[in-house]
Amino acid sequence: MDTKLKVAVLGTGIMGAAMARNLLRAGHEVSVWNRDATKTEPLAADGARRAASPADAVEAADVVLTMLYDAAAVEEVVRAAAPGFRPGTAWIQSTTVGVQDAPAVAKLAAELSLDLVEAPVSGTRAPAEAGQLLVLAAGPDAVRRRVAPVLDAIGARTIWTGRTPLKGPPRGSNLW
């Protein structure tokens, strides 16, 4: 299996930009999009392809990573990206969304035939820039293997909390 992937990063604020840079360092082909296009300029200088729209960013992507403001932004941007998705594209959703919003994210993934991995991260700017985030992920086994090179590039450790993104960590665990 080729571990060099085409990855689209939607949202290039502090965390998303750091993730995109680590993906580039790992040798992945990275497309970036941000609502404020000027935030993608430094990433283009590092080798990323600047996309004109979310749909342009995700076209031909093996994996799409979202790191946006909130659940509403996730829905808006992913719907805007919909024309560019291929069925079965892996979607790593790293935006911090509340438990109450997780079902809507899962429903959106199913509607667009995307393979969802919920993957919130723990860490601040310095760990993000160093590729040392802690990733708390949930997703089916087959998708886990497909997204592993991306999670390895952005994090020091990935803790898989379950096979279904909606279920999250086991009851009584201290992961959330």
Image (spheres, rainbow, N blue to C red):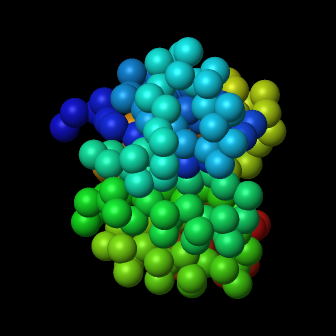
Counting labels gives 0
Question: Looking at the picture, how far across and down is residue 85, in whole percent?
Answer: 33, 59
Q: Quadrant of residue 112?
A: bottom left
Quarter of the image for the N terminus: give it. Answer: top left
**Residue located at (68% from left, 33% from top):** 39
- Which residue is located at x 65 percent, y 48 percent? 35
Q: Is residue 41 above or below residue 80?
A: above
Asked if 169 appears above or below 132 in the picture, the reply is below
Instruction: Specify the farthest residue to the top.
Output: 45
Residue 158 screen position, x and y as percent: 55, 47
| Quadrant of the image containing the C terminus | bottom right
Residue drawn at x 73%, y 48% is 122
Q: How far across and down, in percent of the image, does residue 136 sit? A: 61, 56
**Position of 62 compared to 119: left or right?**
left
* Furthest-front residue in this view: 52
Taking the image as shown, residue 75 lies to the left or right of residue 117, namely: right
Q: Quadrant of residue 19?
A: top right
Residue 114: image x %, image y %? 35, 67
* Picture layout, residue 81 above or below residue 100: above
What residue sits 68% from the left and 32% below the top? 38
The foreground one among 153 and 31 is 31
Q: Is residue 11 visible?
A: yes
Examine the rendering and report whether any part of residue 9 can be seen: no
